[in-house]
Image (spheres, helix red, strand yellow):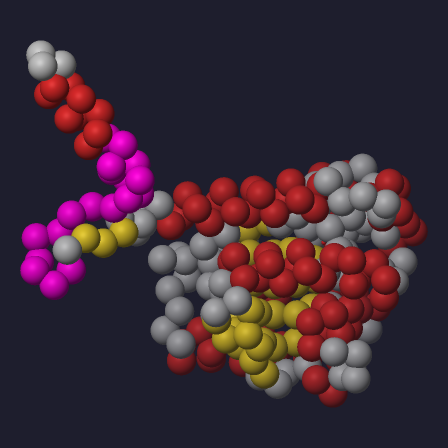
Amino acid sequence: MRNKPALKTNKKKLYYKLINNELVYDNKSIVRYKKNNKNNAPKNKLNQLEELRKRINSIKNCDLKKNATNLVFSDGNPFAKIMIVGEGPGANEDKEGKPFVGRAGKLLDKMLAAIKLNRKNVYISNVVNFRPPMNRRPTDEEIKKYLPFLNKHIELINPKILLLLGATALNALIGNEVVISKARGKWTNKKFGESTIQIIASFHPAFLMRQPDQKKYAWEDLKMIRKKISELKIKLDGK
Ligand code: URA
């Protein structure tokens, strides 16, 4: 009989485990208990992103991966409310394992700075996460292979604004029937997971380097983003 209290404690522990020990009790009469997941949310997000990164890294039978040096997953702030999607890594990105670090990246940084943004208040990824050889455009088959990862990536980041840079990102996420020159600078929306996200497309910085006369249109698109940030009262620190 002496070990009865200990037995009771063990039973209690088992009971808490069974009912999920993340539950905390609340004094309010209506809510008897609630899930204390508020502080876990940031950690969960980072864990899930890491999980996704690992899943992409273990992709099988993919020529992109076979020919690449590094996985290029993302850059920027995972808690940002603005997400940017490009096409795919180039040589510099492949070397560093980070998106938009080459010449196109430098122009992207300037474009962001023009509307008072930087990599601390945006999150950046690409349609494909391994460099296509010779910087060619990813094939439809490759895009199809990486699209579930990209959709999941967007769902996990859950931005308020999604900026698609160039035709590849636009066609992958909105459809092949749209063309960048017509679809840019227009808000549309799409559901990712539980959230409906505002989407805008603009020209890719690499295209703007080849066609600088088109920069005036990109500037219009950037101003639309700045306006939307104010309208949606987006906090740029990601909180
Ligand atoms: N172009 C892209 O689309 N993505 C990069 O990461 C770099 C260049």
The spot of residue 231 in percent (x, y) is 40, 80
Residue shown at 68% from the left, 60% from the top: 148
Of residues 6 and 124, which is closer to you in this image? Answer: 6
The spot of residue 17 in percent (x, y) is 30, 36
Of residues 197 and 36, which is closer to you in this image? Answer: 36
120 left or right, relative to 36: right
Residue 57 visible = yes
Asked if residue 26 lies in the magenta stretch, the reply is: yes
Quadrant where the image shows the N terminus: top left
Q: What stretch is highlighted in magenta?
A: 13-31
Name, please, the residue furthest toward the right: 134
Quadrant where the image shows the C terminus: bottom left
Within the image, what quadrant is residue 135 found in? bottom right
The count of marks equals 0
The spot of residue 138 in percent (x, y) is 85, 60
Name, please, the residue furthest toward the top: 2
Residue 109 visible = no
